[in-house]
Amino acid sequence: MFIEDLIIKLSNIIENKVNQSILIAFQEYLLKAGIFTLASQILAIILMAYIAFIILFSIVSIALSVNLSIALILAIFIPTISFILILFLKIEKRASEIENSIPDFLRQLSSMLKVGLSLENSLVDMSEHGKGPLYDELRRVVVEIRMGKSLDESFSNMAMRLNSKDLERSFKIILNAHKSGGSLSDIILDVSDDLRAMLILKRERKASVMMSIMFLIIASTVAAPFALGMVGVYSSFMIELGKGGAICEVAPLAAEIYLIIHSILAGFLIALIMYGDLKKGLRYSIPITCSAFAVFYIINNFGAGFFGLV
């Protein structure tokens, strides 16, 4: 196929031109998201998407007499933000699936240890027969152990890849018990019960704050941009009547700046309420800002016609 051949050719060019450390780092992010395609091929697809969007938006800008520079910025901005959001969402979803399946995995591991299998043999057996993102990670751990890495290092790397403090703490307890020669099966069973209880608490916390989250989302994506868009409509109306001053000319720009700041802060506040972690705010700030700005743009430019002011 022409498209497949083009992706392969672009992929080869990217592999030769781009630093390998960058490709490896990007590949790690793809693996976190459960995307097992080569990093160079994904970059080739993104490059093709850029070209397609630039052509499409250029045609639209010419047809609708829109500023070409704005169209080109949107042609680059939209696929970039879309890919980043999809990647973040897939990473989040995969990490959540792994966390939810860890208690059952540990209970199964505890049962295998009770029947006399060693920890290493139990992990190998489970990696060969299990299905799902957790067992994909487990297969990687087994491969790393066979290539010479220690059990401690392989499990630590797995916890770091998944970016889960709960898993890191659980693996540390299990590995310390394995080193000290304690009753590993009983300890793993206790860790499994603790993780299950923590997951229940997380679900209850999310359910309890959902009304606050919905209020923030509606206020950030509908109420605030609508109100600020009407400020622009009112300013334009006053200028057309010849009664507008300097404040009417500055008001739309000030509204845009305020809207962006408000949307970004709302995203970080949602992350703080849901996860207690400000670092996760970016994945909410970007879509909220984009949605809010879209509503603001529609009201600011077409609101006068909606409300019969023109």
Image (cartoon, rainbow, N blue to C red):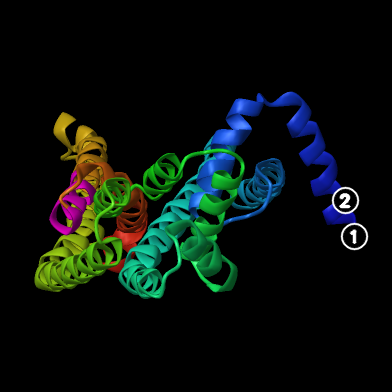
Towards the viewer: 225 or 304: 225
Towards the viewer: 21 or 155: 155
Using residue 81 as the reference point, say whether residue 237 is left or right of it: left
Q: Position of residue 188 (x, y in %)?
A: 27, 64
Q: For residue 210, which numbered disc appears in the image?
A: none
Q: Position of residue 133 (x, y in %)?
A: 49, 64
Residues in magenta, as a range: 265-275
Q: Tell me the kind of residue under disc 1.
A: Met
Q: Position of residue 30 (x, y in %)?
A: 55, 48
Using residue 38 as the reference point, say whether residue 143 is left or right of it: left
Q: Secondary structure at mark 2?
A: helix
Q: Position of residue 45 (x, y in %)?
A: 70, 48
Reading the image, the residue beneath label 2 is 5
The correct choice, above or below, for 306 with respect to 44 in the image is: below
Q: Main secondary structure of the magenta part?
A: helix
**Can residue 300 be seen?**
no
Q: Quadrant of the C terminus?
A: bottom left
Reading the image, the residue beneath label 1 is 1
Q: Residue at x 57, y 38 (%)?
A: 148
Using residue 16 as the reference point, say whether residue 214 is left or right of it: left
Towards the viewer: 165 or 238: 165
Please check the rendered image and state whether residue 4 is part of the magenta-colored stretch, yes or no: no
Q: Tell me the kind of residue under disc 2.
A: Asp
Which of the 4 quarters of the picture holds residue 223?
bottom left
Q: Quadrant of the N terminus?
A: bottom right
Q: Residue at x 50, y 56 (%)?
A: 137
Towards the viewer: 122 or 290: 122
- Callouts 1 and 2 close, C-beta under 8 Å: yes
Estimate how packed mark 2 is, as few (under 14), some (14 to 19) or many (20 or more) residues with alpha carbons within 10 Å.
few
Please check the rendered image and state whether residue 273 is part of the magenta-colored stretch, yes or no: yes
Q: Secondary structure at mark 1?
A: loop
Using residue 276 as the reference point, say whether residue 77 is left or right of it: right
